[in-house]
Image (cartoon, helix red, strand yellow):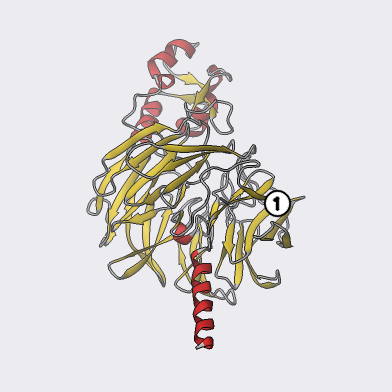
Amino acid sequence: MKDLRFLLLLAIGALSAAASNWPQFRGPNASGISENGQPPVHFGHGSNQLWKVTVPRGISSPIIWGNHLFLTALENSRLLTLAYDLRDGRELWRQAAPAEKPEPCHEFSSPAASTPCTDGERVYVYFGSFGLLAYDFSGKEAWRRPFECLPSQYGTATSPILAGGQLILQRDGDSTNSQLIALAPATGRILWESPRPLAGACYSTPMVWRHDGVEELIIQGKGRVAAYSMTGGEPKWWVRGWGFSAVTTPVAGDGLLFAGGSGMGDPSEPDDPLFDWTKLIAKHDANKDGQLALEEMPKSLVWHIRKELPIDVPGNGFPMRDLMSFFVDTDKNAIVTKAEWDASEAFAKDKFNADRFVAVRSGGNQDSTTTHVQWETTKGLSEMPSPLFYRGRLGFVRDGAMWTVIDPATGRRLLDRERLGIGGQFSASPIAANGFIYTVNTSGTFAVLRAGDTLDVVAVNQVGESVRCTPAIAGNRIYVRSADHLWAFAP
């Protein structure tokens, strides 16, 4: 009887530990949800703070298994994998990737942007500058699999996942060598590869859609969201759209898949006055030839892209001369004609190039754009944070701290861009536990909401440093990576 009791306690402990794990980007299946966690609602510098330790810089999110927390970072041009003890934040080990040099990336990003994943035996990390590496929990390298660094305007940001006993990686770049690839977690042996030659650079992470007794590997990329078999091959179905690089990761719930993101803006909104051709010609056509030479455009004329944010936020101001040179002047003669302007305007307003978010029914076959989209919207979409499906509702946060809640079955808006009162830019995705939703802006200010159909901000918390990574929840703790620190908070 004592032996039986002992085994029962072990089993309960194992189940409890599994429930507390946060094994990949955004936790279980990239959902952002901790089903059993009860982290604090009120926390911050000195408030419900268990510990705080200095960590090297990077924007990968923390992952957790048992008493281990893993991160990647960049320090002195070295790409690092780091392990920490959850109990006190003590660094357990660090290993450097054998990359010749970090890949170039946008100033807002980092060569250490991809989040690791783990199965409890090994931790798997991906650096676009090198490839995949696997370490055991003591820090010993298990295997390595180098890959070429695919070109990308902003740098690598997709994260590996574990699904169906496989390590899966979406390697999309501005190259015909883009691919979806699966490896054996124990050895790094390639199990299958699915070429994606027309994919284009992408920053999304795969997820698994489980429905009707099947599992589909969902890949959001440039041009479409597609479903693959867990054994690879050609896509089973896809929905077209999104002419620009995908950033967000899909979620699923109530028998539907939800995917989308930002593009050339919301076509239902009024045009930006800056793009009025008649006014541009009247003001800047110095030689009165009915065209706009690039040199006629003043360098000081800048498009303010995201009006919710200051124009000096990195990437938020686009000089008109550069915009016209890159995207409008198709024959590259340094002159923009009315025909070129009209063509660029039509391109921007095409729904496949604009902001777009869709709900997809199961059962699609090949191109399902017109047959399996239950509803779609272009309003108030987030740019970098992924959506959250929690307790029968779909939510997303937009720059400017605007929160939207949608009825997933109908697409009806229950809350439409309601202000959370903290402002700012958002990079981290919302996460949820115990009936609360946690959002954080890049200034490090959290707005904690009560999940529901009305806006109820129950706490505003600050850590005093920039936060651009999605936090992790394990048990009754929330772990936050800020610019220079790793924090643990508990009730």
Which of the 4 image quadrants contains residue 314?
Answer: top right
Residue closest to the eye, 51 or 109: 51
As displayed, is residue 96 above or below residue 377?
A: below
Residue 101 left/right relative to 264: right
Give the residue furthest to the right. 76
> Can residue 116 be seen from the camera position used here?
no
Closer to the camera in the image, 401 or 225? 401
Residue 436 point in image, percent of width and height: 43, 47
Q: Can residue 268 be spotted in the picture?
A: yes
Q: Is residue 42 above or below residue 373?
A: above
Q: Position of residue 286 (x, y in %)?
A: 50, 11
Q: What is the residue that sits farthest to the front in this orientation?
A: 1
Q: Is residue 259 left or right of residue 335?
A: left
Q: Is residue 385 left or right of residue 47?
A: left
Residue at coordinates 48% horizontally, 65% vertically from top-left? 19
Q: Which residue is mark 1?
A: 74
Q: Position of residue 337 (x, y in %)?
A: 42, 24
Q: Would you place residue 316 above or below residue 473 in this image?
A: above
Q: Position of residue 320 (x, y in %)?
A: 51, 24
